[in-house]
Amino acid sequence: MDTQQILSLVKFNSQGLVPVITQDAENGQVLMMAWMNEEALRLTLETQKMTYYSRSRQSLWLKGETSGHFQKLVSLSVDCDGDTLLAKVLQTGAACHTGNRTCFYRTWTPE
C-alpha cells in the first residue's frame, strides 16, 4: 500500500487529527498515544520515523528530536472505521517524556 492509499483510508476528526497508538514491535508493549495530522502522517510514512502533531504547541514534532529517543516505524495499521492508527515501532530509549519506557507505567488491577 502506498502513502496515498493509506491516506485515503484515514478519517481525520474535525480538528484534522487522528489518534495513534504506538506499540513496541518487538514485545507488543503499548508505549504511548499521540495525534497526527495529515502532514505528520505523510512524514512518518516517508521517513519511517514517527512524527506527531502536538495539540498544545500546534506544531509537528519528530519523536526523539530533542531526547534522542527515536521511534522507527515497522508497520502502520488503520482500524476498521479508519479513525485510529496503530503504529508498531522500534523504540530507542524511553517513549514517555517522564523517562519511563511507556506512558502507561501507572497500573491498577482489581483485587
Image (spheres, rainbow, N blue to C red):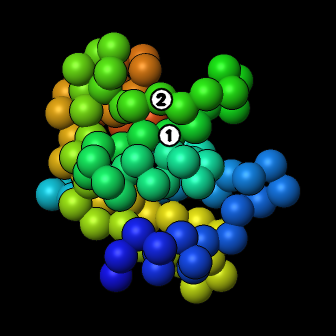
Question: Disc 2 to disc 1, how far (Cα)?
Answer: 5 Å
Secondary structure beneath disc 2? Answer: strand
| Residue occupying the far top of the picture | 66
Residue furthest out toward the front: 4
Of the pair 63 and 110, the residue shown nearer to us: 63
Q: Which mark is residue 87?
A: none
- The answer to whether 93 appears left or right of 60 in the picture is left
| Residue 105 in sight here | no
Q: Report whether 107 appears left or right of 24.
A: right
Residue 88: quadrant of the picture: bottom left
**Residue 103 percent coordinates (x, y):** 45, 35
Label 1: which secondary element = strand
Answer whether labels 2 and 1 touch (C-beta < 8 Å).
yes
Q: Nearer the viewer, residue 3 or 57?
A: 3
Residue 12: image quadrant is bottom right
Label 2 crowd (10 A; few <14 / some 14-19 / many >=20): some
Q: Nearer the viewer, residue 38 or 109?
A: 38
Q: Quadrant of residue 71?
A: top left
Instruction: Give the amino acid at mark 2.
Output: Trp
Give residue 8's position: percent from left, percent from top.
Answer: 58, 78
Q: Residues within 10 Å of mark 1 (few under 14, many from 20)?
A: many
Q: Residue at x 66, y 20 (%)?
A: 57
Residue designated by label 1: 52
What type is the residue that disc 1 sits on? Answer: Tyr
Task: Give coordinates of residue 40: x percent, y percent.
Answer: 50, 46
In the rendered structure, the answer to whether residue 110 lies left or right of residue 51 reads: right
On the image, numbered disc 2 is attached to which residue?
A: 61
